[in-house]
Amino acid sequence: MSALHGAVPPSATECADRLAITDVIHRYSRGLDRMDRALTLSCWHPGGTDDHAPLYKGTAAGFVDWLWPVHAAMLCTRHVVTNTIIDLAGNEAGVETYWTLTLRIPSGDGAIDSLSGGRYLDRFERRAGAWAIQHRVAVRDWARTDPVPAVPGKPLIRPNNPEAPGARSTRDRFDESYGVLRNYFDQAIGSI
C-alpha cells in the first residue's frame, strides 16, 4: 500500500523503491547528455519500448539507435527532470516526470537552441530486484527555438584566477564526473 497524502507513513521498502525509480529517471538524462549508450539502455528492461511519436515509436534499443546520431550532431544536450510522481503497486509502478530539454544545434557560423518541455509517462517494473522502464511515452507540452548570439571576447564576469583551467564538460566517459562517480556507473549498468 502506498502512503498517499501522509495518511500512512511510507515503509522503508516503499522509500527504497521510490528512490530506485527516481535514480533510473536521472540516469536516463545523464546517459543521453554524456552520450553514454550503456547507461542510457540500462534504464529499460530488455524488450522495453519507447514512444516519442512522431519522432520514434518502437523498442528502447531501436530508440537509442535512432537517437544517437541525432544527438551526436548537436553541440550539447541538457535533459532536466523534475516533479516526479510515482504510483507503486507491488512490482509495478506508474510514473510521471516533467522534463525540460535544451538542444544546442550548429547553424551556419553560430548555433540555435531548441527548447522544449513535457512529461515522461512510464510503466516501471521490478524484475530480479531491479526497477527499470518497461514502456515510456514522451508527451511534449511546449517548444520554442532561439538563436544563440555570439559570446563577446571579453568575459562577462571577471575571473579571479584567469590562468587556472576550468573543469571541461565532455559528452563521453572523459567527463570529470566519471572519476567522481565511477562506482555508481559500473553498478547501474550491471543492474539490468
Image (spheres, helix red, strand yellow):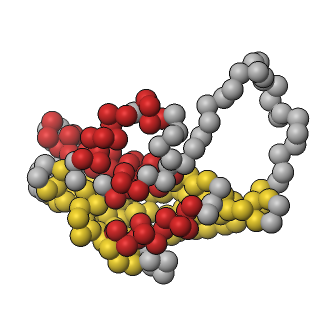
Quadrant in which residue 167 is drawn: top right
Quadrant in which residue 145 is drawn: bottom right
> Where is residue 94 shown, x and y percent of the image?
26, 61
For the point 77% across and 56% down, the residue is 148
Left or right placement of residue 68 versus residue 45 in this view = right
**Extreme-top residue of the structure:** 160
> Where is residue 173 shown, x and y percent of the image?
47, 43
For the point 50% across and 47% down, the residue is 172
Of residue 30 and residue 91, the one placed in the foreground of this image is 30
**Extreme-front residue of the structure:** 174
Left or right placement of residue 10 versus residue 28 in this view = left
Is residue 58 visible in this depiction of the protein? yes
**Extreme-bottom residue of the structure:** 54
All told, the count of numbered labels is 0
For the point 87% across and 43% down, the residue is 152
Of residue 18 and residue 62, the one placed in the foreground of this image is 62
Is residue 112 visible in this depiction of the protein? no
> Where is residue 47 shown, x and y percent of the image?
24, 70
> Where is residue 40 shown, x and y percent of the image?
38, 56
Of residue 62 and residue 83, the one placed in the foreground of this image is 62
Left or right placement of residue 24 versus residue 82 in this view = left
